[in-house]
Image (tube, grey):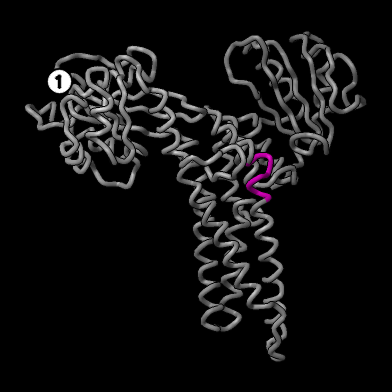
Amino acid sequence: MMNDDTIMALSTPPGTGALAVIRMTGPDAFLITDKAFRGKRLSEAETHTLHYGYMEDGGTTIDEVVVGIFKAPHSYTKEDVIEISCHGSMFIVQRIIQVLLDHGARHAKAGEFTLRAFMNGRMDLAQAEAVADLISSDSESAHRAALNQMRGGFSSELKKLRDELLHFAALIELELDFAEEDVDFANRKELADLIIRIKSHVLNLKDSFALGNVIRHGVATVIAGRPNAGKSTLLNALLNEERALVSEIPGTTRDAIEEMININGIIFRLIDTAGIREATDVIERMGVEKTMEKIRQSAMVIYVFDVNEISYDDLLVDLSQLPSNDIPVIAVGNKIDEISEEQLLKKMEGFKNLLFISARENIHLDLLRNKIVSMITKDKDLSDQTIVTNARHYDSLNRTHKALTDVEHSLESGISKEFFASDIRRALNTLGEITGDIATEDILGVIFSKFCIGK
């Protein structure tokens, strides 16, 4: 995988805009640009400077531009990098791109700039993947997780673990070289303690994926309950707009309505569903079946009930009939504006994850918002911890945990050194897959093909 050519791409979104940025990296980036740029000779300019001038094609002016230059190794790719800011006309952009191609550049592939940054040691693989996550982040929590990973927070944790394990792996390999002398260079008690510590850390990282996955993709949250419990009114109240049809007639909602909402920096996908009751017609039965299916696919359920209509025992029965898939359920008693809250608290005393609100009168909705967030984060402070958001990393951590467990069993059983040496190598390899210390061209191809062109 050679970096001996010069690549170029439009880095801003395609389409007409005020400005566009064309990016180029490679050994001939300055030479190619100098052939078309009328202004200061860029190859002689200082790094990290901006230069005003004109892009020309055979003596014909295309546009006035500002060119930023970043000289190797102090650039995103650790190669010479040029960034041309021009006017956003697609005609202008295509003319400039064609001139650069004519002078020796080629079109970059998806993610090729970041791939070069990885190949040149500017960042490891986990950091490179975080670049794509940062670009696509649409909430504060997703942005924070990606930024932490891009800055190397996740990688530095893994590197420490891997370096410690690598030390023992080297000693075990040394023992294998001196097998005839039957000597032990690696202290088995210290190795066992290290394996326990690394396993615990890997397990914590694995467990964080459940939270990281919903932070990255949004928390699928189903609003369920009996007909006319106020589900649609609650959706409208949380969104602060009339999105769902509200009616006194039970069963108005026949199909699921899905909307996005940002609560305390986390994206929730609120899904208003058909009321759960004994269906009276085919369409209503299909709606109820769809509600149950949505609940099975969700990450959280807000079960809304009318406090004037349902008793404590009825609520327990309703909740017991929901699909059981170990997801958090918040029971929300609605329409408290029509009844004494003290009576309700006494009637429902001891019930876990219960809130009383009035969606219509906007009573206690802030309490509900805070409860929704705390149920997902489990009241963890997300600002200072590493959260795994990438399925590939989760898979590698899973296999690392399995390899470490095998090392533990090998140490306990006193099995031959060759076997637990092999298990330690497996653990080192799976950890190395995350940061790119162990990487194949196939893996890199899959990862960087998901990037946008120009990044």
| Magenta highlight on residue 151 | yes
The magenta stretch is 149-156
Q: At x 50% / y 27%, what residue is drawn? A: 264
User: Which residue extends farthest right?
Assistant: 44
**Left or right: 70, with 340 as reference point:** right
The residue drawn where x is 80% and y is 30% is: 29
Tell me the residue that label 1 is attached to: 250
The residue that appears at 25% across and 22% down in the rendered structure is: 340
Q: Is residue 326 left or right of residue 82?
A: left
Q: Amino acid at mark 1?
A: Pro
Residue 195 lies, in percent from the top left, at 59, 67
Residue closest to the far left: 280
Residue 355 percent coordinates (x, y): 32, 31
Q: Is residue 249 above or below residue 414?
A: above
Q: Please indicate whether residue 90 sits to the left or right of residue 334 in the image.
A: right
Residue 109 falls within the magenta-colored stretch: no
Which quadrant of the view contains residue 227?
Answer: top left
* In the foreground, 353 or 192: 353
Q: Is residue 197 above or below residue 123?
A: below
Q: Is residue 13 above or below residue 164?
A: above
Where residue 4 appears, x then y in whole percent?
77, 41
Q: Position of residue 184 (x, y in %)?
A: 69, 83
**For residue 221, which quarter of the picture?**
top left
Which of the pair 410/440 is nearer the observer? 410
Crowding at mark 1 (Cα within 10 Å: few <14, some 14-19, many 20+): some
